[in-house]
Image (cartoon, helix red, strand yellow):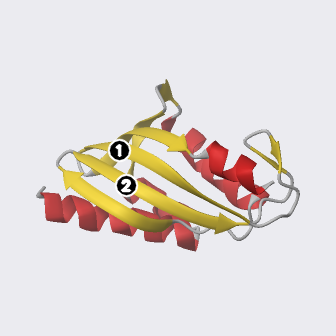
Amino acid sequence: MTDEDLAKNYRGYIACLNAQDWRSLDRFVHQEVHYNGDRVGLPGYRDMLERDFREIPDLYFDIQLLIADTPFIASRLQFNCTPKETFLGLPVNGRKVSFSENVFYEFLDGRIRHVWSVIDKAAIEAQL
């Protein structure tokens, strides 16, 4: 897989998330996916994403920066959303917040095997 192919695959993954097309998630995410060092598996990863959309109904993943270096992707995602209650332990309670996520992925056989994510919690705190 070339860097260009990997970036295209990642954009497909983000489109899958934004469409909440959970049936297609296995096209992009490996069965043995790890998230921030923990093996969560595809079912656990899907549960996490579904929970995120329940708690943040207007959640939308907006790619601001994308760097592909096969088998890795580095991405900066931007969010402008309205969490219903608490988010990252913060009492957002329906207020609109903007923040970014810096996330790194390792792909295996064309699917995401490892995810390392850091969310800019300080940006959210500054808005509350």
Between 47 and 70, which is closer to the camera in this rendering?
70
Q: Is residue 14 left or right of residue 53?
A: left
Q: Are marks 2 and 1 in contact (CB under 8 Å)?
A: yes
Residue 96, horizontal then vertical, whole percent: 76, 67
Give the residue displayed 69% in from the left and 67% down from the top. 81
Is residue 13 visible in the rendered image? The answer is yes
**Residue 106 figure quarter:** top left
Q: Is residue 21 left or right of residue 63?
A: right
Tag 2 secondary structure: strand
Q: Is residue 44 left or right of residue 112?
A: right
- Say which quadrant the N terminus sits in: bottom left
Tag 1 secondary structure: strand
Between 85 and 18, which is closer to the camera in this rendering?
85
Task: Categorize mark 2 by other alpha carbons within 10 Å: few (<14), some (14-19), many (20+).
Answer: many
Task: Categorize mark 1 by other alpha carbons within 10 Å: few (<14), some (14-19), many (20+).
Answer: many
Residue tagged by mark 2?
75
Residue 66, horizontal then vertical, whole percent: 31, 60
Mark 2 or 1: in front is 2
Residue kind at label 1, given as amino acid type: Tyr
Residue 121, horizontal then vertical, whole percent: 64, 44
- Say which quadrant the C terminus sits in: bottom right
**Residue 5 figure quarter:** bottom left
Relative to 78, residue 108 above or below: above
Residue tagged by mark 1?
105
Q: Is residue 79 left or right of residue 106?
A: right
Residue kind at label 2, given as amino acid type: Ser
Is residue 47 visible in the rendered image? The answer is no
Give the residue displayed 69% in from the left and 60% down from the top. 53
Q: Between disc 2 and disc 1, whose residue precedes? A: 2
